[in-house]
Amino acid sequence: MDKKAGNWEPKILAFLCSWCSYAGADLAGVSRLQYPTNIRIIKVPCSGRINPVFIVKALQVGWDGVLVSGCHPGDCHYLSGNYYARRRFTILNRLLEYAGIEQGRVHFAWISAGEGKKFAKTVGEVTEVIEKLGPATRLVKAELGNGKKK
Amino acid sequence: MMDLQTKLREEAKRLLEEKKVDVVIGYEDGSMALRTTPCFVKDPRDVERLVWNALCENNLAKYLIGRTNKAAVIAKGCDVRSIVVLINEKQLEKENIIIIGMPCAGIIDRKKIYAYLGGADVKQANIENGIINVKGDGFEEKLNVHDFLHDSCLACRYRNPVFCDILVGEEIPEVEPKDEYGKIDQLEEKSSKERWQYFSKELSKCVRCYACRQACPLCYCKTCFVDQSFPTWFGKSTDISDTFSFHLVRALHMTGRCVDCGACVRACPNNIDLRMLTKKIEKDIKELFDSEAGLSIGENTPLASFSEDDPQDFIG
């Protein structure tokens, strides 16, 4: 996909917890729900596993957007992983915005295993927001961005 | 009334003579004017080396980490708070250290003096009663110490140690900082692009010397994330993307732990205003979780605890 040509499509990286959101994505699939194909999924054991470094790194290597999703508060398989994660994400989200990363590059959502529809809807919305923002440029390392050498 | 320096030396002498500690970690005069340097006194006859004045800037908590002998450490309000964080994070045994607390009305930022003097070389400096007398080739000026304090000192709310074994002198009144988050509030009002440009410009000065990390009393990881090579999280170059990412993550690691002692800013050879990142997080932590770092032993850092009704407006 050439960023300069008119046929640019955003690439979005999703971190999904294996117990809820990944199962939610699975449900969306087996229910044959339609959602944009811009998303690439990394399955993590828990939203508490997501180190803010992962998200900063994703932006650095040129992903146009990041979606982070885990179990709803109170539903964590490990009881409290998502509560700890929520605090980290709060600070990260504010810091990224403050440092000048466009609002809307990084998204957070709670999606349960039964919410296939919510997963499809969230991916649709996130893709739309990032399409409007255009290709990521800030924080992207030129030689790494979009898998292309400068 | 005895001055604080004499009292401090007496306390240090007593601790060493009574063999309560193996070493007293304090400050001595540096080899250049306007400087002090950390000093380690092991012999009671050497306590005369110790000094105490408004130039004692280093956060000596750094020298406590990994220490196997018993140490007494001279600590200002901010230094004590970083020691408290270290104790809470199980990096120090409270029993192995004696904190000699010093009430502190602020430390001189010598770069501000150099700037005021237009870069003139200061050969000699004496401080007496809040006035610093600086001398150099062909000039002599008397300056008010309060006009040349570090930015972090101007934002200080804890001039007295929150906790100590020995308090030298008497507590001084706390002052409400003026315009504590002034620069941060101003930046927050700007557009996303302007903020990006501000930080890109500021952080492009970084040469990745890691002095900020080395000076920080709370950066004690055996392997720092930027030194890891498997995986290599961020490149080691001065590419703006690499430096930006390094500083973002460094600030994130300080979340709820940074006591704003200003050690990182003082260590920076290129005068990057690192507090613009750490102080911002401190502000958020206070606002969101009503938490301040290093105020009491036994407290949990905000990221190591949670509440079921933490804010989550940004999560869909």
Image (spheres, rainbow, N blue to C red):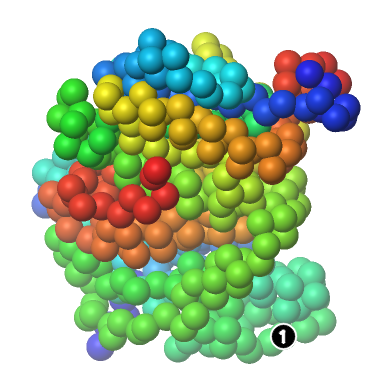
| Image location of residue A100, percent across then percent down | 64, 51
In which quadrant of the rendered image does the C terminus of chain A lie? top right
Q: Secondary structure at mark 1?
A: strand
How many marks the image carries: the answer is: 1
Quarter of the image where one finds residue B187: bottom right
Residue beneath the point at 69% across and 52% down: B196
- The one of B188 and A77 positioned closer to us in this rendering: A77
Q: Is residue A82 visible?
A: yes
Residue beneath the point at 72% across and 85% down: B140
In which quadrant of the rendered image does the N terminus of chain A lie? top right
Residue beneath the point at 36% across and 42% down: A88
| Amino acid residing under circle 1 | Glu
| Image location of residue B51, percent across then percent down | 41, 65
Q: Which residue is mark 1?
A: B140
Chain assignment, label 1? B
- The one of B72 and B233 positioned closer to us in this rendering: B233
Vertical arrangement, residue A22 with respect to residue B315, above or below: above
Residue beneath the point at 49% across and 39% down: A107
